[in-house]
Amino acid sequence: MTTTTIEAAEPADAAAPPRRSRTARRRRVLALVAAGAALLAVGGLGAASLVKSPAERAAQAAAAPNSLITAPVTSQVLNRSVPARAVVYPPAQYDIVPSSASPDVTRLYVSKLAVRTGDAVNSGQLLAEVSGQPLFALNGPVPAYRDIKPGSSGPDVTELQDALAGLGYSLRSDDKGAFGPGTAQAVTEFYRRLGYPVPTTGATTQQAVDTAQKAVDASRQTVDSLTAQKKAGQSSAAQPPTPAPTGPAPTAGAPTGAATGAPAPATGLDIDQQLTAAKKQLAADRTALDKAQAVNGPMVPAAHAVFLPTLPASVTAVNGSVGTPATGTLLSLTSGGLSVTGQLTPAQAAGVKTGMAVEILVEDTNTTLKGTVGEVGAPTTAAPTGKVITLGGGSGGTGGTSGSGSGAGGSAGNAAPGAPNAGGPGAGPAYVPVAIAPAAPLPAALNGRNLRLTVLKDNAGQPVTAVPVAAISTNAAGRTSVTRVDAAGNRTTVPVTTGVSADGMVAVVPGVGAELRPGDQVVVGR
């Protein structure tokens, strides 16, 4: 038996490894070729960016085009002016220091405030109440320096009478400058209108009136008794002699019949003589009563009245509140408007004259106020400032009794006084003070401000063609011109003649045949 050995056949992919190796090599070659192509492309782009044409190189090497700064030609009035600074301050500040008008007041406290900072004050207006006593404003040039009482006379009485008459109160038949019954009645009515009891001259003068009145009554009784006796038929012829008194002699100083109210005893005179003497005594007693009444009655204590020369005034400070001690200045008022003083250097002041127009610029509100130069002073280093006048603070009257007025307590916040020296140069370089007369009263809010002042030295009168000073060019021959630029950027040199200049602008007149109109653009810089 033949044995046949059959060997297993080899797998068909035994030769596969050589084929895979060739495929991988091909792939690697293709990848290398692609990478090389990419590198060549990038290199080509980089090389292309470095290659420039002559035109491109010239464009990059050329300077940047010039940029022009232009401004419009205008038509306006030009004023040759002097710019400076000015200080605003009150010509007079009145510091009111309360004082007592009554010996019954031992301490001064603010019991009422009737005004606040910024308020306007008119004549007859209540300002405050201190320990029940009113403090009011009246129009008058001289501050109160004494209590004004019945029987007083002088310019301060005239001042009071004028103030009362200005408020509509009648003085009746009182002479000017004499405090009589008409003035007393006007004072009474004024205090009643304020709502306060009328101050009087006090118990001493009233007692004198009462005593004089009793003497008059007694003398009148004596005259009436003697008159009745005479009418009853008692004649001097029938009157028996009066025997001499047998009692002790009257004590020195003992009251007579006129003083006691009993008829005068017979003194050996007939009834007619007694009646004549009694009538003479009555006349004397009436004269004494008139004198006592003339110095008794309503009065105006100096501690109550604040006389100010110009009203209305403005309250610039309230330094207290209800319930606090009234020590020092309680109120500060300014009267007569605000003053303005310009501060010019000596060079600026040259040529500035009285009457020149000025403009005052309130810079934070851009408000322009008009005025004129009032006076040009001598160089100084002292700060511009007004007067500070203290009113009150004395001991008040000693013989008067003030009614203890009442009223609901008010309140007002404290405020700092106005600062008239604000903005002044102090002891700095010398300047020329120029007093300014505003065309209209300045607002109270400008008190203490430092403002821009422009003195208008010259006026072109009519609008002129004007360009900025920077637009003017001058050549070597001294001829002036401007460069006009149209909408397309074309430039034209326009010869001009210059005129007045102010605030950075100058008037120009184009040369013969040249044109320059408002609205054209001219070169002012590059």
Image (tube, grey):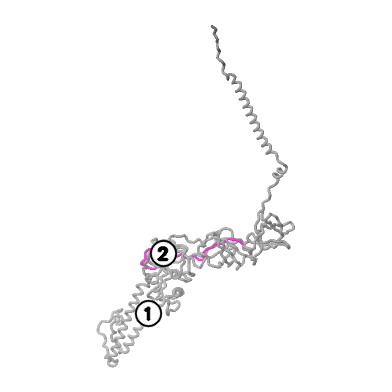
Residue at image location 38% in from the left, 78% down from the top: 291
* Magenta span includes 83: yes
Tell me the element at label 2: strand
> From this viewpoint, which residue is outermost toward the top?
1
Q: Which residue is mark 1?
A: 290
Which numbered disc flags the more N-terminal residue, 1 or 2?
2
Q: Which residue is mark 2?
A: 113
Name the side, left or right, on which 300 lies relative to 484: left
User: Which dot, 1 or 2, sits closer to the camera?
Assistant: 2
Q: Which quarter of the figure has residue 5?
A: top right
The foreground one among 514 and 44 is 44
- What separation in Å lies between label 1 and label 2 (alpha carbons)? 40 Å
Q: Position of residue 67 (x, y in %)?
A: 67, 51
Kind of residue sitting beneath label 2: Leu
**Is residue 124 shown above or below 60?**
below
Instruction: State the extent of the magenta-drawn residues as a range.
Output: 82-109
Q: Which quarter of the figure has residue 373?
A: bottom right
Tell me the element at label 1: helix
Name the side, left or right, on which 243 lies relative to 46: left
